[in-house]
Image: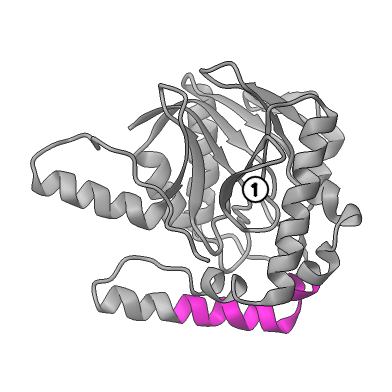
Amino acid sequence: MHYNAIWLSDIHLGYRDCKANFLLDFLNKTHTNRLYLVGDVVDLWAMKRSFLWPPSHHEVLRKIIDLANNGTRVIYIPGNHDDLMREVAGTVLLNIEIHQQFVHTTHEGKKLLLLHGDEFDHAVLCNRFARLAGDAGYSLLLHFNRWSNILRRWWGLPYWSLAQYVKNRVRNARAAIIAFEEAAAKEAIRQGADGIVCGHIHQPEIRTIDGVLYCNDGDWVESCTALVEHRQGKLELLHWGDLQQAIKCDQAANDSTISAPYSLPRLS
């Protein structure tokens, strides 16, 4: 499958709950002219607490470098968990461009502002979400998420995010997410963009806010999603689990291509 662009964020390499194997599978089964890494690629915060770097995490990093060395334009916008890389914004490292922010022009000529999203923490009610995402309760939620998917694999079921399901039903978390999305849309308007792509809150979404297209590409800890631009310019969220099911269906039909896009099911 070939796309004009793919956006990934919040991979959190070096963190125990990073779904590196899923992401590596995704990268091996997709092709793109441009790969945007919208922050928190390596989780330096987690690695300071406890160093973790399994082979799968190294393979993801190596795959990204290989893409950059073989014709894919890779643009990296550091986030808060890899903020040390912001000190070298404006440079090129291993053929990967590093920017504080970036503007992507779609096939249809729309200007999309690219930011990680932690820039909006001070402006919204995101302190509630930060407490949710940083406390022991969130870690416990990810623990249950991990074990629920082990059981699902035993039963032959695809990956499903228990963490996303629960988070969308916590009223304070939903209020903080909505406030974040609205702040992001205002920033796109302020900078004269047609839309914005960000990550940070681990909440995949595409919707229009005050005439501005808001896109959040999700993460590879909970949702395992990416934002893609099709060759005709359509923007879509791809869920790794749905992608796997689509490929299985195509293999059963002896067809090597996916004939229709598969969208992330809404979790609300």
Q: Please, what is the dominant secondary structure of the magenta stretch?
A: helix
Circle 1 SS class: loop
Q: Which residue is at 68% across, 66% downward? A: 51
Measured as percent of width and height from the top left, residue 59 is found at 48, 47
Apparent side of residue 136 relative to residue 244 in the rendered image (left or right):
right
Relative to 173, say whether 217 is above or below: above
Q: Residue at x 47, y 59 (%)?
A: 266
Q: Position of residue 205 (x, y in %)?
A: 57, 50
Residue 210 lies in quadrant: top right
Q: Image quadrant of residue 230?
A: top left
Bounds of the magenta segment = 131-147
Q: Nearer the viewer, residue 107 or 86?
A: 107
Give the answer, above or below, for where 104 lies relative to 124.
Answer: above
Front residue of 23/69: it is 23
Mark 1 lies on residue: 41
Q: Is residue 122 left or right of residue 118?
A: right
- Along the line of sight, which residue is nearer the eye, 208 or 11? 208
Quarter occupied by residue 102: top right
- In the image, what residue type sits under mark 1? Val
| Residue at the image position 85 percent from the left and 67 percent from the top | 127
Give the x, y percent position of residue 104: 64, 24
Crowding at dot 1, Cα within 10 Å, few <14 / some 14-19 / many 20+, comes out as: many
Q: Is residue 211 visible?
A: yes
Horizontal side, residue 244 vs residue 189: left or right: left
* Residue visible at 40% across and 53% down in the picture: 240
Q: Does the magenta stretch include residue 145?
A: yes
The residue lying furthest to the front in this view is 210
The quadrant the N terminus occupies is top left
